[in-house]
Image (cartoon, rainbow, N blue to C red):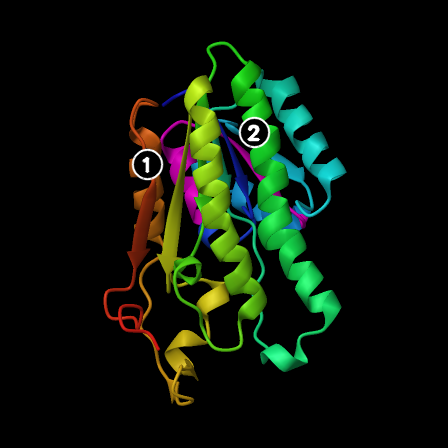
Amino acid sequence: MTGKVAVVTGAGSGIGRRAAIALGEQGWNVVLAARRVETLEETAADGAFKAGNCMVHPADVSKPEEVDRLFEAVSARYGRLDLLFNNAGIFYTKPVEEIEPADWERSMAVNLNGAFYCAQAAFRQMKSQQPRGGRIINNGSVSAHVPRPHATPYTVAKHAITGLTKSLSLEGRAYDIACGQIDIGNAASPMTEAMPKGVLQADGTLKREPTMDIANVAQAILFMTALPLEANVQFMTVMATAMPYIGRG
């Protein structure tokens, strides 16, 4: 994989950080993107990047002009793009009747609009470069299939990500662009810190939920990226075995 170029959004923490490090360990040149430069620099300090095979580029993916600057910087430095891991996202819980317009708009702006802006920019680069093509992996979450209580904006956005994945897969066929989706459940990260303490269930009770090592997600992503562009993992679900997903509700 040495010399290939990846952009990882949300690379400052959690799944994004671990995926970026795993790619760096495999010899990828990794562009680290997130809003906060401090967390990106913490990721870049990992030993996986001792060879200098990374670039830190702060960007708010909800702002199309910042996404444009991100991908312009990638093109200027590396001249091509082989992988986008579309991972940036935010999550909060509120009963549906208490969701403010600003809450809804912010969730859509990051979880859906940001994913689209990044995918669009990556698609343009992959279509025009020589040799053309590349791979886009969208982080869908198990919420792309089933909701949690009090998570309407996140659930709606993640269902829409599935539509984005399918559309990119269809339009990418003509340009050697493969698009797949990884749906992750209860990987141990800052977003799932509450799981072992107890979280709201569909029946109104609070129950502890098991989590899994985030390294399992990174391994799944590496498997997807290792395939030649003639092959694609369209959808993959990787989750803690005992989490309440099958039969949720």
Instruction: Give x and y (percent) for residue 27.
Output: 39, 27
- The tag earlier along the polypeptide, 1 or 2, is 2
* 30 to 80, vertically: above or below: below
Q: In the orientation shown, which residue stands out farthest toward the bottom?
A: 205
The residue sitting at 43% across, 62% down in the picture is: 143
Q: Which residue is mark 2?
A: 122
Q: Nearer the viewer, residue 227 or 13?
A: 227
- What is the C-alpha distance between the residues marked 1 and 2? 17 Å
Instruction: Give x and y (percent) for residue 62.
Output: 69, 48
* Amino acid type shown at disc 2: Ala
* 3 to 214, vertically: above or below: above
Q: Is residue 117 left or right of residue 242?
A: right
Residue density around tag 1, few if under 14, some if 14–19, many if 20 or more, within 10 Å: many
Q: Is residue 243 left or right of residue 142?
A: left
Q: Is residue 129 magenta?
A: no
The residue sitting at 50% across, 65% down in the picture is: 191
Q: Nearer the viewer, residue 235 or 63?
A: 235
Q: Which residue is mark 1?
A: 224
What kind of element bears circle 1?
Answer: helix
* Amino acid type shown at disc 1: Met
Instruction: Give x and y (percent) for residue 199.
Output: 43, 81
Q: Is residue 78 left or right of residue 65?
A: left
Q: State the extent of the magenta-drawn residues as a range.
A: 18-36
Residue density around tag 2, few if under 14, some if 14–19, many if 20 or more, within 10 Å: many
Tag shown at residue 123: none
Q: Is residue 29 magenta?
A: yes
Q: Classify the position of the N terminus by image quarter.
A: top left
The residue sitting at 32% across, 36% down in the picture is: 224
Q: Nearer the viewer, residue 21 or 246?
A: 246
